[in-house]
Image: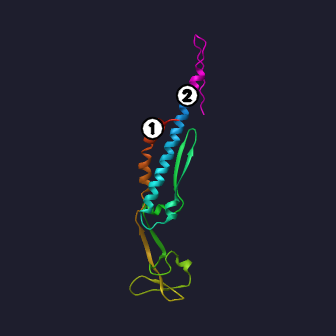
């Protein structure tokens, strides 16, 4: 941190250096406070708008909505805001993707009790290859279909977090000006 030391001796014997340094430090503190406040406002607005975007994107529950988080690193010379998601594969919904099976992806049938489970978790399944239609996995216990097989699935872009972050970050100057004008 840079220090300012000024001593000015006036003819009447008064030193204005201490007053000038105090004024400088007060102004510096005001700038730092405004910088931190602006960063905090950017963080809060991105999280609020991002969570709203996720909840309106489809069938995404609380885990997805609350998984969007921020971290702020606020120091004397830095105001860093990091936006992240706790679900590691969130980017699939941010940019879209095609996911390929190895060799098949097993998707639970909407009418079965397998919804929300993977074929491995369900257990006790056997495969039926049909002449027409996709292959099925049926339950060993009740002999009813639980999953269908598909080679790949294309997931479209559903989230707009990058766009939201850029738009809100563009307001940083106005947030800083307002915080500086409010002053402390």
- Please indicate, yes or no, whether residue 43 appears anywhere in the rendered image: yes
Q: Is residue 94 visible?
A: no
Residue 24's tag is: 2
Q: Which residues are magenta?
A: 1-24
Packing grade of label 1 (10 A; few <14, some 14-19, many >=20) is some
Q: Residue 123 at what x, y percent from top left?
A: 56, 82
Residue 176 drawn at (x, y percent):
47, 40
Helix or strand or loop: what does disc 1 sit on? helix
Measure how far apart labels 1 and 2 are at the Cα level: 19 Å
Q: Is residue 32 above or below residue 144?
A: above
Overall secondary structure of the magenta section: loop
**Residue 127 percent location from the top left of the image:** 49, 85
Residue 148's image quarter?
Answer: bottom left
Q: How crowded is the residue under tag 2: few (<14 C-alpha within 10 Å), some, or many (20+)?
A: few
Question: Which residue in the protein does label 1 denote?
Answer: 177
Residue 11, magenta (yes or no): yes
Q: Quadrant of residue 29?
A: top right
**Lower sequence index among marks 1 and 2:** 2
């Amino acid at each position: 941190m840079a220090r300012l030391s000024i001593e000015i001796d006036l003819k009447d014997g008064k030193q204005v250096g201490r007053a000038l340094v105090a004024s400088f430090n007060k102004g510096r503190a005001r700038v730092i406070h405004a910088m931190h406040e602006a960063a905090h406002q950017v963080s809060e607005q991105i999280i609020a708008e991002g969570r709203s975007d996720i909840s309106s994107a489809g069938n995404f529950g609380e885990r997805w909505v609350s998984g969007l988080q921020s971290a702020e690193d606020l120091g004397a010379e830095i105001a860093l805001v990091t936006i992240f998601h706790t679900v590691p594969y969130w980017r699939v919904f941010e940019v879209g993707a095609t996911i390929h099976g190895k060799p098949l992806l097993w998707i639970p049938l909407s009418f079965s009790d397998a919804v929300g489970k993977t074929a491995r978790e369900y257990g006790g399944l056997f495969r039926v290859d049909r002449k027409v239609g996709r292959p099925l996995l049926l339950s060993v216990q009740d002999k009813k279909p639980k999953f269908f097989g598909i080679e790949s699935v294309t997931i479209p872009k559903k989230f707009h977090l990058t766009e939201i972050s850029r738009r809100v970050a563009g307001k940083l100057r106005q947030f800083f000006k307002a915080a500086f004008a409010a002053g402390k």
